[in-house]
Amino acid sequence: MENVVDLKEEQEGDLTILKIKGRLDAISAPNAEKKVFECINNGQHNLLMDFSEVDYLSSAGMRMLLSTTKKLKTLSGRLVLCSVNVNVLDVLKMSGFDHVLDIAQTKDEAKSKFHH
């Protein structure tokens, strides 16, 4: 059960909150991506990913975030990450992903990004 990533889905109006728990790496990212794309294909185009319990992000996890962002852009949706821990944030910053992804400190700040 080492590399299992757990995704919990909540709906708040037209916003889908995905609480991700565990490591997003080469083993778990494809499953996480499948789940995220299921949400998108079901018409959920506003995704908030709660990263408070993600303790590791690899390049595979970053690819998943990138493909999700691109897919949502084509559908006029958006992806916002919130509560990203310091280690994961460092990885995102080192790779320049903090400029590509929408990252909010808190869930409330993230939610406010959807209502423009």
Image (cartoon, rainbow, N blue to C red):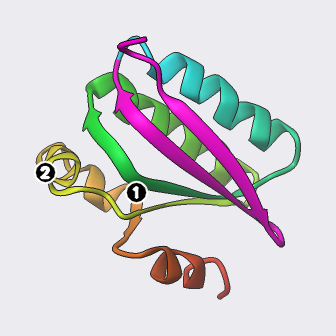
Task: State the separation of the CA atoms marked 1 and 2.
Answer: 13 Å
The residue segment tinted magenta is: 1-25
| Few, some or many residues within 10 Å of mark 2 (<14, 14–19, 20+) | some
**Along the polypeptide, which appears first: circle 1 or circle 2?**
2
Say above or below: 59 vs 80. above
Task: Report which quarter residue 99 is drawn in.
Answer: bottom left
Res 90 label: 2
Task: Report which quarter residue 36 is drawn in.
Answer: top right
Pick out the residue farthest to the front: 1
Task: State the quadrant of the N terminus.
Answer: top left
Task: Report which quarter residue 42 is drawn in.
Answer: top right
Query: In terms of depth relative to the viewer, which is nearer, 78 or 54?
Result: 54
Identify the residue at horizontal 22%, vertical 46% (top origin).
Answer: 88
Identify the residue at horizontal 64%, vertical 44% (top origin).
Answer: 8
Residue that badge 1 annotates? 101
Task: State the quadrant of the C terminus.
Answer: bottom right
Q: Amino acid at mark 1?
A: Leu
Residue 101 locus on image (x, y percent): 40, 57
The kind of secondary structure element at disc 2 is: helix
Query: In terms of depth relative to the viewer, which is nearer, 76 or 55?
Result: 55
Residue 90 locus on image (x, y percent): 13, 51
Left or right: 45 with respect to 83?
right
Say above or below: 48 vs 108. above
Give the prevailing secondary structure in the magenta stretch.
Answer: strand
Say above or below: 51 vs 64. below
Residue 107 locus on image (x, y percent): 49, 74
The kind of secondary structure element at disc 1 is: loop
Q: Amino acid at mark 2?
A: Asp
Identify the residue at horizontal 18%, vertical 43% (top origin).
Answer: 95
Res 70 label: none
